[in-house]
Image (cartoon, rainbow, N blue to C red):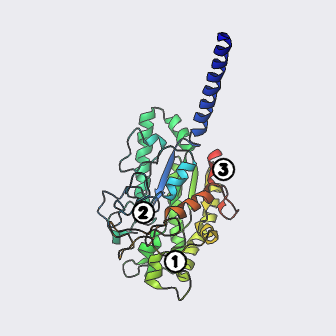
Amino acid sequence: MASKLGLLFGILVIAFVMQFQTVIVIAQPQVPCYFIFGGSLVDNGNNNRLVTTQKANYLPYGIDFPQGATGRFTNGRTIADLIGQRLGFPEFIPPYATATDREISTGVNYGSGGAGIRLETGRNLGDRISLDRQLLNHATIVSRLKLLQGNITFTNEYINKCIYLVNIGTNDYVNNYLMPQSYLTGRIYNPDQYAAILTQQYSQQLTTLYNLGARKVVVFGLGPIGCTPAQIARVGTNGRPCVESINNITMLFNNRLRPLVDDLNNNLRDARFTFVNVSGIAANRLVLPNVPCCQIQSNGLCVPNSIPCPNRTSTAWYDGFHPSEISNSRLAARAYIARSPLDVSPNDISTLARL
């Protein structure tokens, strides 16, 4: 009897170990690392030490985030956080401002509130880390990785497999083109001309990212800026849900992004860029009211230590410009696994990770 019990116990232990090993394999991230570029929609603390009005390191920001107010411009997780979790990363990707040598092998978040494709974008807000500066920071991180890993060939192959998320361009309108009193762009370019020069500069920056080793790059389109509570309050809608004139202007840029992605894929060897149609996804999601959840200041950000709305799962916007976590969650789900061919092109993020 003892021998039978011993055999049974042994079988159970082996089965347990095999089951445990399976769990470990499933829990591994789908790609070795994840790098994030953009503005306040992805910023997770890089602006905290900058001299700028674009900061979110105070309550009620982060009220639903495990670590509280970290610098994320929402009540909980950003779109970048949510996609990182879907990719299987057990921890949130650290901001460049505080990333350690131990952390950078799994990725870095370079996002900065107020940042834009154009260098001057967001200067009315104070300091910010433009996309050009973010790319310089990434070059520094790649050099650090090569030094730490001790094998340039290995590092080059390693970073080729990673996912790169780029979500930028909103500030090039909100804190540039749509402010003709502060920026020349709104006075010297018509909307189509501005979209064209913005796309041209963006193409050069994405090519720079490719030259730094990126191959699997997710390019987010602009959301419906004319539907933000701040723009609605500033311009008015004449009884319509959104400021259609603003959405029409930004759509000229959005319409150039899918062809831009196609050109990069056709002209750069092994490039696997993909476009996320944010405005299209937003237009087809469950309609939520275009009102802020928190009490907002004149700059559209939450009043410090104010009390936000109690039901934050029923509001699209957290402050005057930034989506709530529930909006971010719905967008992340459609970007990761597309529900329609119009959501992404040519691959959703789950497919991109497997390529």
Q: Earlier in the sequence, mark 2 or mark 3?
A: 2
Q: Residue at x 65, y 63 (%)?
A: 343
Q: CA distance from mark 1 to mark 2?
A: 19 Å
Q: Quadrant of the N terminus?
A: top right
Q: Position of residue 223 (x, y in %)?
A: 54, 69
Q: Secondary structure at mark 2?
A: loop
Foreground residue among 141 and 113:
113
Query: Do the residues bearing badges 3 and 1 touch, measured as CB atoms within 8 Å?
Result: no
Q: CA distance from mark 3 to mark 1?
A: 31 Å
Q: Give the residue pinned by disc 3.
A: 351
Q: Residue at x 55, y 59 (%)?
A: 329
Q: CA distance from mark 2 to mark 3?
A: 29 Å
Q: Amino acid at mark 2?
A: Phe
Q: Amino acid at mark 3?
A: Thr
Q: Is residue 109 left or right of residue 86?
A: left
**Quadrant of the rendered structure where residue 249 is?**
bottom right
Q: Quadrant of the C terminus?
A: top right
Q: Secondary structure at mark 1?
A: helix
The answer to whether residue 178 is visible is yes
Count up the numbered dots: 3
Which mark, residue 73?
A: 2
Q: Give the residue pinned by disc 1.
A: 226
